[in-house]
Image: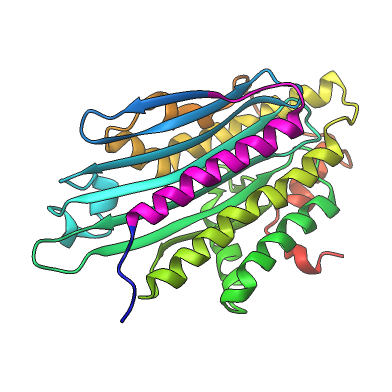
Amino acid sequence: MPQQPDPQAVKHYLLQLQDTICQRLAVTDGGGEFIHDAWDRMEGGGGISRVIGSGKVFEKGGVNFSHVMGNTMPPSAAAHRPHLAGAPWQAMGVSLVMHPHNPHVPTSHANVRFFIATPENAEPVYWFGGGYDLTPYYGVDEDCEHWHRTAANACAPFGDDVYPRYKRWCDEYFFLKHRNEPRGVGGLFFDDYNTGDFARDFEFMRAIGDSYIDAYEPIVQARKNQHYSDAQRQFQLYRRGRYVEFNLVYDRGTLFGLQSGGRTESILMSLPPLVRWDYNQTSTPGSEEARLLEHFLTGRDWLTAS
């Protein structure tokens, strides 16, 4: 008989994941610490926001755990599952974004999440989602290859088609339609993940969650002490505008959090502390800034890039 969904086991793992990521990123930063901010949600549930600011490496970063619940599905979720609109539900997850000072260190985003609804006189309905993506400002081929190789290795035990499918989904999801450009170099994105085997599905979510820090930490270590100019810093701030645009216009997690009455400070912790928009900005042909769009933000296959 298949194992029944176990929300408590998922919650235990997510809290452990939050601890592990914060510990390792604090060591990588070498100067900043994550503050701990627990919060409650009036409608049910709450969470723990852990935020680092003005560190040696990270200008701002947040690793947020949330566990919220209710009896009426938020519109963004009910639109996909109208038959669950009146069912009690729980949603929990860890979501993080790290914004570095140094423009040679990419911004990274990751999340893993679990949703379960319990219709009256019916079996629980659950699904997992998540993934991670990388947003460089001055790209390095070997960093992108390492990022995607780590993602592919995490997916490998679950089928040969898993990484290509979720890599493609990530490229399609993290795409700014109004700019006609990707947000970054991608990674993984999956949603509505339910094969009917809860134990195996939970194992997959853990594999993705655990692999994020192994994908990101070596890149940060390799680039965090690299010299940069003020012009490169200004280009980083300009490109951060794309990050803000995506999160406020397209991001499902942001939309779900705001519609479900989540804590606004935690939901919007993903936004960078400094950003700029320049009118009709263009980069000099042949420059590293131009190469970002021409070489890196192309949705390419990084496993065969070299």
- 126 relative to 220, above or below: below
Q: Residue furthest bottom?
A: 1
- Residue at the spot 17% in from the left edge and 51% down from the top edge: 88
Q: Report the quarter where the N terminus lies.
A: bottom left
- 244 relative to 134, above or below: above
- Residue 22: where, in percent of width, then height? 61, 35
Q: Quarter-wise, where is residue 122 in the image?
A: bottom left
Q: Quarter-wise, where is residue 281 in the image?
A: top right
Q: Quarter-wise, where is residue 53 in the image?
A: top right
- Residue at the spot 61% in from the left edge and 68% down from the top edge: 155
Look at the image and say whether residue 161 sits in the magenta stretch: no
What is the span of residues highlighted in magenta in the rendered image? 7-35
Q: Depth check: 14 or 273 in front?
A: 14
In the image, taking residue 303 as reference, residue 212 lies left or right, namely left
Can residue 282 be seen in the rendering of this structure?
no
- Residue at the spot 12% in from the left edge and 53% down from the top edge: 86
In the image, taking residue 61 as reference, residue 283 lies left or right, namely right
- Residue 248: where, in percent of width, then height? 45, 34
- Residue 136: where, in percent of width, then height? 73, 41
